Image: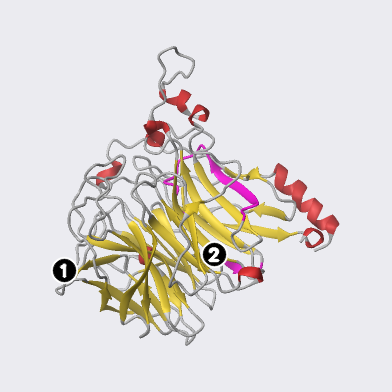
Amino acid sequence: MNKKRFLLLCLLMAGRQLSATTVPNRDESWFLTDTLPRENVPNRLITITGDPRFALVLHPSAPIIAHDGRQPFLFLSGQGTLFCQAQLTAPPFRTKDKQVFLVRMGSALSRDGGRHWTPWTHQANHDDVNLEGGAVQCADGTILLLDTYVMEGKTPGHGIGELWKSHDDLRTVEGPFWVDFKLPHIRWQGSSNDIGKTEASARLHRSILELPGGDLLTTLYCRFEGDSAASGYMPTMLKSRTVVVRSRDHGASWAYLATVGVDSGVGTEGFAEPVLARVSQGAHAGRLICIMRTGRQLHQAHSDDNGVTWEHPQPMRLPGLDIYRVQDWEGLFGYDPKAPDFVPRDEMNGSMVDPELIEMRDGTLVCGFGLRAPEKRYKQDWHTPRNGNYLAFSCDGGDSWSHIVQYRSGAPTTQYMGVREIRPGVLYVVYDDSMWKMPGAARGFELEVHRNPLTQ
């Protein structure tokens, strides 16, 4: 791309505002009582930190799962098939011997780059694989999917989870197959989830990687014996750690490899909701990068020996974003910082949630994440401009995040999202436009990412 075309794209980007289509919904789940009215707020690109090497073009969004879907996750096969899954408003089927989420999972496939979506289920009236556990297409073409829940096994220090397989690009799926997770020192009991309900399980999350030698790695968050620090906002929920587990038999069994992060003083939740990616180009080729939610800032760690050892996680440097800058939103919640008796309240701090991480074909790293401002009370008034969904870009293997944009600002969303590169330089981004008490749907859009060749 020449310099003139790049500058034209920059001008187009600066002036572009694209609207989303309103999609009605009907409320049936426990978290959609007393439903708020649907509010249509358009997406638009807002540059938080600019890097002249990038110009982005935002395309209109469209619904993926008709009239429904929250907190979407996304997988892309080597043949270009997109698989999106999100939480529906219907209750789960509660399939025998399977741990399920509080609501049903809805899935859809697209074989034309997200233009058209077809509902997908492995078996009618049964709970499918929960894609939050991650998916990978191996070198032999097999697609492996892990359900997010790892339940306590019959042998101490072992858990049991579900593996699903496809040999034909998700046209058919086999499973579930029970797989063993060797997790010495794991603590199954003693903690609730973030709504106060007892939860005796570990959670696989987002990423499965196949290393050049054929080993598989994935991330899991859980508690080990001795992990007893309480969450900052839910005393019955203990802070978690993030670990890496490895499979040397194509996913049939998994074993603990290393702890990526554990620190009782970090955030309000410890290290949770990890995402894992492998750098393939540049000075850090072969490096593994893990980004984690903490209930406050995102934290980032890396490994240069295929996950055996990890540098201690550090707060992710995202210029222009400060979750402690409560003055940007506290006025919406009745707080007056100029009042003589004003005392800043911890509950007004923001929170970054559920990071996503991929490497584009040109070596650019893309991190997607949500920012809740404030952490819990954003549900009462989501209009603060910092509340929403973000994308950060790195040209140096994750050492710095030099270009940061927000595409959903002061708009209804649960701040969860997924990202994949569907064509060279073109991302497909999924998100939702709903709140827990507001109708909405999982949606997707294309985002063109242009790199200026004169400023590399």
Assign the C terminus to one quadrant of the image.
Answer: bottom right
Residue beneath the point at 43% across and 56% down: 292
Residue beneath the point at 45% across and 80% down: 169
Q: Which residues are magenta?
A: 400-424
Assign the N terminus to one quadrant of the image.
Answer: bottom right
The residue under label 1 is which amino acid type? Lys
- Residue that carries the numbered disc 2 in the rendered image: 358
Image check: 200 left or right of 281? left
Q: Can residue 380 be seen by looking at this rendering?
A: no
Task: Looking at the picture, tell me which residue is in the foreground, 61 or 202.
Answer: 202
Residue 148 x/y as whole percent:
32, 65
Residue beneath the point at 60% across and 44% down: 319
Mark linked to residue 229: none
Distance between the alpha carbons at the discs numbered 2 and 1: 35 Å
Of badges 2 and 1, nearer the viewer stands 2
Q: Which residue occupies the extreme left position in the image?
A: 154
Residue 204 x/y as whole percent:
34, 65
Image check: 422 left or right of 437? right
- Compared with residue 15, is residue 68 higher up or lower down, i.e. above or below? below
Residue 328 x/y as whole percent:
52, 29
Say if the magenta span includes residue 329.
Answer: no
The residue under label 2 is which amino acid type? Ile
- Residue that carries the numbered disc 1 in the rendered image: 96
**Mark 2 Cα-neighbour bin, 10 Å: few <14, some 14–19, many ≥20:** many
Residue beneath the point at 47% across and 53% down: 299
- Compared with residue 446, is residue 174 higher up or lower down, i.e. above or below? below
- Compared with residue 115, is residue 392 higher up or lower down, i.e. above or below? above
